[in-house]
Image (cartoon, rainbow, N blue to C red):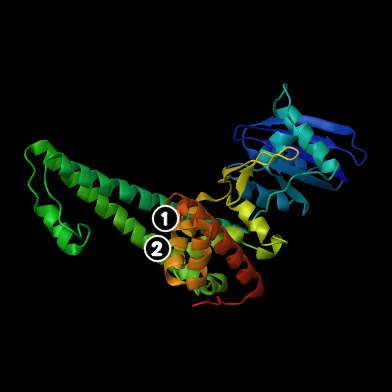
Amino acid sequence: MLNVGLDVHWSSSSVCILDENGKMVKQFTRRGGWDKMLFDLANLQDRFRIVFEASCGYGTLYDRLRRLTPDVLVAHPGRLRGIFQSKRKNDRIDAQHLAKLLYLDEVPRVHVPRKQMRQWRQMIECRRRIIEKRTRTKNGIRSLLRGYGIRQPRGLWTNKGRQWLESVQLPGEWPQVQLTLLLEELEQFEDQANRITKQLDRIAARSPGVTLLRTIPGGGPRTAEAIVAYVDDPTRFSRVKQAGAYFGMVPCQDSSGPRERLGHITRQGPATARKYLVEATWQAVRRNRGLREYFERICGGKKERRKVALVATAHHLLRCMIAMLKSGEVWRSAA
């Protein structure tokens, strides 16, 4: 069986092919899109397997390569940099390195979710970006009003508050134009947020995993869907502790001999799911006695440890979520 290493870019693709003994059979570069490279691979006479590095659009390329051979691996780019610390680097060398790793069965693989799951993740990320834009617009409105010394009532974003905003008269034509544009922008983002939220709610209603995680006190649909979408297959974690590393909830470590140094959490993995998880943990700590006791035990009555305790509780809650998805068991409350 041939071992094919690909270093793929939008404008060119470098290919390195090794035989079953690890000897180079062919190496070439194709300019342009993926079609020329895929055509060459489809014309290979022998059976082959492929490895390429995960990057933007890797899911689409993975699907197209799977039509040529069922044995397609996607390599983790961060771990590849740790393996090859070379002063000489180009696309052809990278393709050769990937082919050698494939021949040695040492490829640091990443999980490739199904197409439907990838699209679900994209919708979750799209909603987060819309919400962030809406928040920036709201902050811009508040800043504009404060800049002209206008006191803002409570409930500024309710129907009553919006009517008040539309009636505000700022001193000058230009400030009034700014306020009008910001209000139009806010209405646009709210409409987009409502539309994509309805779509996500329909998807979540069909997901048993989301329904299961919503039994957690304080766990809303956005947190549940983000965890389920990014976990995809909970059985890929042989231990629930591995999920903490995947979501970046474990501390950085720099240890040598008897000295052990732990720093901030790594923050690797899906940032959106991690953000929602921490927000849900605040609510869960307030509503569940068991989680509140866990939080207070780590906090130790010290205000400066509240953030540390919150992240640790979120990590604990994440492990519980993975265990629930594996077993199909609902949340067992201690309160």
* Image coordinates for residue 181, horizontal then vertical, percent: 20, 45
Q: Is residue 271 left or right of residue 45?
A: left
- Amino acid type at circle 1 is Arg
* Secondary structure category for the residue under label 1: helix
Front position in the image: 312 or 71 = 312
- Cβ–Cβ under 8 Å for marks 2 and 1: yes
Q: Is residue 42 visible from the viewing direction of this image? A: no
Residue occupying the far right of the picture: 21
Please tell me whether residue 95 is drawn above or below residue 224 in the rendered image: above
| Mark 1 burial class by Cα count in 10 Å: few <14, some 14-19, many 20+ | some
Q: Quadrant of residue 57?
A: top right
Residue 334 image point, x, y percent: 53, 76
- From the viewer's perspective, is residue 125 above or below residue 88? below
Residue at label 2? 197
Q: Earlier in the sequence, mark 2 or mark 1?
A: 1
Determine which quarter of the picture holds residue 315. Answer: bottom right
Determine crowd level at label 2: few under 14, some 14-19, many 20+ residues with C-alpha closer than 10 A.
some
- The local secondary structure at tag 2 comes to helix
Q: Look at mark 1 in the image and give the residue it sits on.
A: 127
- What residue occupies the far top of the structure in this picture? 87
- Image point 71% across, 41% down: which residue? 52
Count the numbered circles shown: 2
Q: Height in image: 285 above or below 169? A: below
The answer for how far apart the CA atoms under marks 2 and 1 are is 7 Å
Q: Please tell me in which quadrant of the rendered image residue 175 appears.
A: top left
Q: Please provide percent x and percent y for residue 163.
A: 13, 59
> What residue is shown at x 68% (from left), y 42% (from top)?
260
**Of 196 and 231, the residue lying toward us:** 231
Q: Is residue 234 visible?
A: yes
For residue 212, the mark is none
